[in-house]
Amino acid sequence: MIQKDPVALSKKVRLHALAMIRDAKSSHIGSNFSIADILSVLYGKILNIDPKQPKKEDRDRFLLSKGHATAILYAILAECGFFPVHELKTFYQAGSLFLGHTNCKVYGIEFSTGSLGHALSVAAGIALAAQWRKKVFRTFVLLSDGECDEGSNWEAILFAAHHRLGNLTVIVDYNKIQSLDTIANTLALEPFRAKWEAFGWEVLECDGHNPEQLERCLKDGFKDKHHPHVLIAHTVKGKGVSFMENTVLWHYRSPQGEEYEAAKDELRYA
Amino acid sequence: MRDIFIDLLRQKALKDPRIVLITGDLGFGVLDRYRAELPHQFINAGIAEQNMTGLATGLALEGYRVFTYSIGNFCSLRCLEQIRNDVCLHNANVKIISIGSGLGYGALGMSHHATEDVSILRALPNLRVYSPSDLSEVQVLIEALMSYEGPAYVRLGKVALDPNDVRTVAINGCNCWRKAHLNVPCILLTHGTTATLAQSVCEQIPFDCEVYTIPCIKPLPENALYTLLKGKRLIVTIEEHTLLGGFGSAIGEYLLDKGITVPLYRFGLPDQFITVGGTSDELRRLCGLEASNIVATIQRRFQQ
């Protein structure tokens, strides 16, 4: 188990991700910042993992389904000791393993993603294997809200409930903005909680930027051992930089020049 | 063929608890014995092939040897991206068992005709593609699948097999169905359900030729093929599959790459959907996949 202060960790990884995305001239900064606090709590307080033995059999499994937010995950892994922090500088570079979508060739990454709606089914298979073999590890999947448009997720949601996968926990990054517009204007998810409940999942909701709430929910908040769990984490896209928050623009825009400096200052002095 | 394959898989699974068979809610009457004897190594994933394939990947990553099972397009095209991104990219030990290959489901219509699967699936990195023609090849195939820890696609026809028809074959080789003479000028290559058709063509054609089945379409048995094809005057491929990118195309690519300049005649399905009824035999004839037509075409072109 890695013990790290999630507040300090999230601050560091936001700064790393900002620099990585600037240097790469890439996008998805808003999606990255949206999950910085969730990942910091997961890796700092929850997951039973060991950077010295990334494949140890009883490790908890974590799959990032929204693979476009991978910069922040690479940064978290670096800060947790899976590889040196300076390797983050190769993000997007020729020959680098640090691709723009989650790459399992990177030390500590469980599964490659990129196209949405894939990881939950795979996680269900991993959780089912653990159930059959009476293993105690937990399997976590982080979904985006927009990704819940994908029908494949709902196939997996049916399956996990039917097979009573109480060792499977989904976290939804519910920032309510997708690629081109808001969730409400695109394909409305509400009543979101009721949908999960109707499918047979135990549901908790929290502020996805509050480390105490996240830790409490993920550590022992779920009580039902016979149903899969979902934590609907209410988040803000672009969280941490005022001019990036709650905008569609920063799904795509790359932070360059003055915008980079302004974002860095906000994060550094937060 | 599917019944024999599933029975062989059942026998393997009885000895190997890592084997798991997942069906997409199909296999009525075919999977009953497997399911009864191995309830803990069987999942009906429901009519949800994307999840079935992702789920199979997850189980495989945890050390299981997973077989997914459904009708042709449902376990292949319906979940193609799961096969590509989940199974193939992660080199997961998932074997995709596709039944009713080609026009096997006849009058059920184009939704059930698996006529483009070889073209599409052989393009995926890491995926082996198999299409056995008879019991011997199925038996060898099962052993090959057990000794290979990576992903594979298995195309099974609905044809009934004669259990007495056991030949000595090697799954990575070219299997001779009817040998005429050494140094015959013409060779017929085929796979899966068209082996008997190729045999009929061979019997009717007025010059010496041989029929070989190639049960492993990807990777092709390149060394064996080189010996077999070099110096021939005519190579013919026959398949119950579109001519665009299928087995005949794979052979053509091989000939080009090796610089083997022998005329290649390809017989298969046209670039169109079959939207009329008929048994699979009737639909094959409608598409020109019958011995008399193939023999006449070969003779006409050979004389030119």
Image: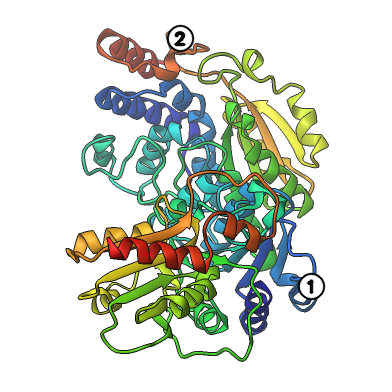
Return the x and y of residue B181 as percentages of the image width and height. Answer: 32, 89
Q: Nearer the viewer, residue A181 or B71?
A: B71
Write down the residue under mark 1.
B32
Write down the residue under mark 2.
A242
Measuring 27% from the left and 27% from the top, which residue is drawn there? A24
Judged by depth in the image, the label closer to the viewer, 1 or 2, is: 1
Chain assignment, label 1: B
Element on which disc 1 rests = helix
Chain assignment, label 2: A
Return the x and y of residue B20 as percentages of the image width and height. Answer: 64, 69
Q: How many marks?
A: 2
Residue B34 falls in image quadrant: bottom right
Measuring 38% from the left and 80% from the top, which residue is drawn there? B210
| Furthest-left residue in this view | B259
Answer whether residue A241 is visible to the viewer in this image.
no
Tell me if A252 is positioned left or right of A95 in this view.
right
Q: Which mark is residue B278?
A: none
Discs 1, 2: same chain: no
Q: Nearer the viewer, residue A29 or A218?
A: A29
Packing grade of label 2 (10 A; few <14, some 14-19, many >=20) is few
